[in-house]
Image (tube, rainbow, N blue to C red):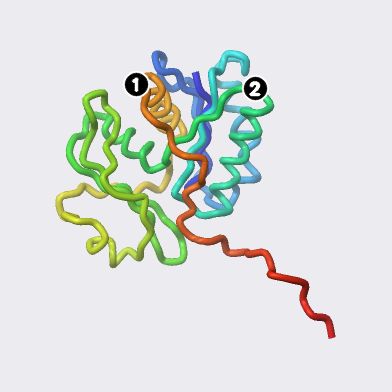
Amino acid sequence: MLLAIDTSTGTSVAVVDRDRGILSEINESDTRRHAEVIGEAILFAIERSGISINSLSGVTAGMGPGPFTGLRVGIAAAQAFAFGASKPLVRVVSHDAVAWGHYATGHVGPVMVVTDARRREIYFSAYSGVDPVGLPIRLQGPGLCRPADLSEQVAGYSRYERIDAAEVSAASAGLLAEGLFFHRRAFAGPEALYLRAPDVTVSAGPKRVS
């Protein structure tokens, strides 16, 4: 049983179980209120699931791709909760969660997951389908480009069904993590998938005062 958090687009928090499915999910679509809503979303998700924190086996964090400020809020919240509850933290690629949710409804064939990267750019990942145990097979990405350049970035672009995901479901992220663990597949690495430098950088030295 996992608490799952993803803030790569809006804010999504869920409690899931591999056998029982989605026990609760809280979603906030506003892409600029992650810090304001993440605490209550975690509280509400746990309360609505009807389970205790001790019943959780771990915490899942969506690692992006996503804009720097929003994405790091969810990752930091997942890390803090896992540390405070003495639970392991596992990580998944947020686009993989979107693909998992798509295929879990019975769809087949190649898909292209696309999310907003702001600055008139998009994030993309290409999938050929699922493996024998139902986990999505990512062929390319996550990548970053301008919308007009997407067809040039992905070989065989026309054969993919495009999914423009305005939200990433934490429930899908959690159930994907359950599947990865059960089938002994690798989780995502510890590095967040920002795919570009943050807007704010540390100055190289003190400013000169005249």
State left or right for residue 110 relative to residue 123: left
Q: Residue furthest front?
A: 205
Amino acid carrying mark 1 in the image:
His
- Identified by mark 2, the residue type is Ser
Instruction: Please name whichever residue, 200 or 32, is drawn nearer the observer in this view of the structure.
Output: 200
Horizontal side, residue 49 vs residue 19: left or right: right
Q: Which of 52 and 141 is in front in this view?
A: 141
Pick the front one: 75 or 101: 75
Q: Name the mark on residue 80.
A: none
Q: Label 1 belongs to which residue?
A: 183
Residue ID at (58%, 53%): 69
Q: Residue at 61% of width from left, 35% of height from top?
A: 79
Task: Determine the residue located farthest toward the right in the rendered image.
Answer: 210
Quadrant of the drawing holding the C terminus? bottom right
* Marking on residue 86: 2
Between disc 2 and disc 1, whose residue precedes? 2
Local packing at callout 2 (Cα closer than 10 Å; few below 14, some 14-19, many 20+) is: some
Local SS, label 2: loop
Q: Which residue is drawn at 26% across and 45% down?
A: 139
Q: Position of residue 75 (x, y in %)?
A: 57, 40
Identify the image quadrant of residue 35. Answer: top right
- Measured from the top left, where is residue 44 in percent x and y? 60, 27
Expressed as whole percent of the image width and height from the top left, the position of residue 46 reads 59, 23
Relative to 209, is 158 above or below?
above
